[in-house]
Image (cartoon, coloured by chain):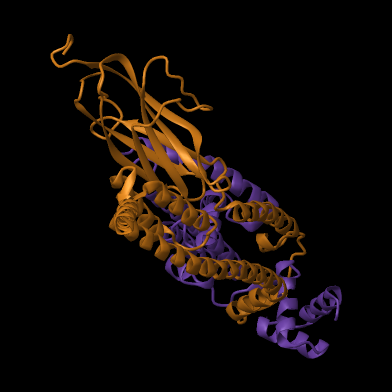
Chain colours: A purple, B orange
Amino acid sequence: MVGDEVINDFVRNFLSHSKDLSVDDLVSEVSRRYGLPKRKAVLKVFRMYVRNVIDLVDINPPVTFIKYLLSSYSLWYWLFNVVVVLTIVTVLAVSSESPLIPIRYVLGSLYVLYIPGATLIEVLYPKHEDLSPLERLALSIGLSLALVPLVGLILNYTPWGIRLIPVTTSLALLSICLATVALYRKYLYHKLRVVSNSG
Amino acid sequence: MIFVMISKACRLMVLVLTVILLLNMSLLSSQGVDVIYGKVGGVYSKLINLKYVNLTNVINDLNEVLRIAEQCGNVCESDVFNYLNLRLNKLDSLINDLIVEDAGLGRLETLKLVVLGVAVVATVVLTYSLGPYVVSYSWYLIRRGFRVRLGRRSHSIRWWFLDEEVVAVIAAIAVVASVFAIATTITSGRVVEPFSALGLLGPEGKIGNYPKEVYVGEPVKLYIYVDNHEGKPMYYRVLVKVGNESTLVNQTAPANLPPVKVFNLILGHEMNSTFPLIVKFNETGINVKLITELWFYNVSSREFQYSGRWNHLYINVTEVGGIGR
């Protein structure tokens, strides 16, 4: 199996001499040169992207917020909403005797201990290079532990009180609102990047 | 002379046979109710070992047998006794079938655990081996049309959840969580602190409004509450006794008095029962002690054993038209 560094060096040389190369072209070239099946070539190129060896440029970036919302840039936002909805459904539908109870435990733990803080961190630090991954994870958990009791404190003074449905609903609303604000901030940075690239 | 003697002997024989026949008939016409209670104990001894089958119907049937037996008093009529005997034989036979079913269900539960364990291990292995390909190919399908250029040579990982430190922290959390999950699975269904509860409730079936003074012969209605949290079905006997201030009863020794009423019941785990107690006091007295004691059937000794749970209520019993009423 060809080492990653060998392929990285080849790709750097290849890119310095080639222009207007798509991801598809690069995968095909790596696959052809090193005799790798396509899935392995894709994995190699993906690892290069994750480690910032290569960068991607969108030739047709979304320019309005609606287009950004419906593009692949917002995939994290829609996946997040799916997780929130799934958590709500699981919490309300799965009883303690059901065999699906472990799923409820896992999703419920994420819902309370990670998601609220993570969305707040995304609002405060929308660019991924602002924080290291471990800092992002640690702050997400810490901020969740701070936010959820505040939600409980506010609910205590409402007519609904601190019960399952009010807590689930309020955390969902909080997380979705924060995620939407984070999405908009990311869109603003994306727009800035598009303008600077085209300039 | 001989004929007279033979005639007398024959008459004597007929008399003796008649007496014997009458004695047998009197014996056959009634049977001790303790026999029924003993047979219930035998049936109960079999059903406490069943873990997976639903015992609600069997317990209800046994309680019905006990209720009918209680109405007999100390001795049951022959037809009632035979009916109860027949029902207990049928229940015994049913429990033998349930034992076989329970063993099968036990094997099924073990198989479910094994399958779950294999599924978890397979999921982990598949995620580890195929996960990177799935994620990378999904990324490729979304970004295949993008143009590629040289990166900025940053040391940070672009996707934070693929960072090695983050994966290490998540793996550590997963290991700790799985320890708790396994511990919960192993200890599920076990009762940490098994106990039985006995309560004496007022005339309305609630705590409070207990009678303080009653007349001689006046029926006093209270309720007895029994609750089972032993983790298995229990065969209880509640003894009602009437004593006085000097009657000693505590959690180690029951009152040294004959019971005035006896209630027998079988309760499954986390089942409870509330039933009325109507008692009349035959003599006057100050601070007459109405005692209720909870006993349970010991399968090893095949006898009822005092559980240490008791209640008592002090009542003043007066003559009709006595002072204070």
Q: Which is more toward the observer, B169 or A73?
A: B169
Which residue sits at x=42%, y=32%? B293
Residue A7 spot, x, y in % from top left: 82, 78
Q: Nearer the viewer, residue B88 or B10?
A: B10
Q: Quadrant of residue B127?
A: bottom right
Q: Residue furthest top?
A: B323
Q: Residue at x 54, y 77 (%)?
A: A60
Q: Between A144 and A101, which is closer to the camera in this rendering?
A: A101
Asked if A84 appears above or below B127 in the picture, the reply is: above
- Where is residue B76? Give x, y as percent: 31, 50
Could you say which is closer to the camera, residue A20 or residue A37? A37
Q: Quadrant of the N terminus of chain A?
A: bottom right
Residue at screen point 53% across, 69% down: B100
* Coordinates of residue A133 in the picture (x, y in percent): 68, 55
User: For the image shown, how many numbered marks are present on the structure?
Assistant: 0
Give the x, y percent position of residue B109.
57, 66
Query: Residue A162, located in which quarter of the rendered image?
Result: top left
Farthest left residue?
Answer: B321
The quarter of the rendered structure image containing the C terminus of chain A is bottom right
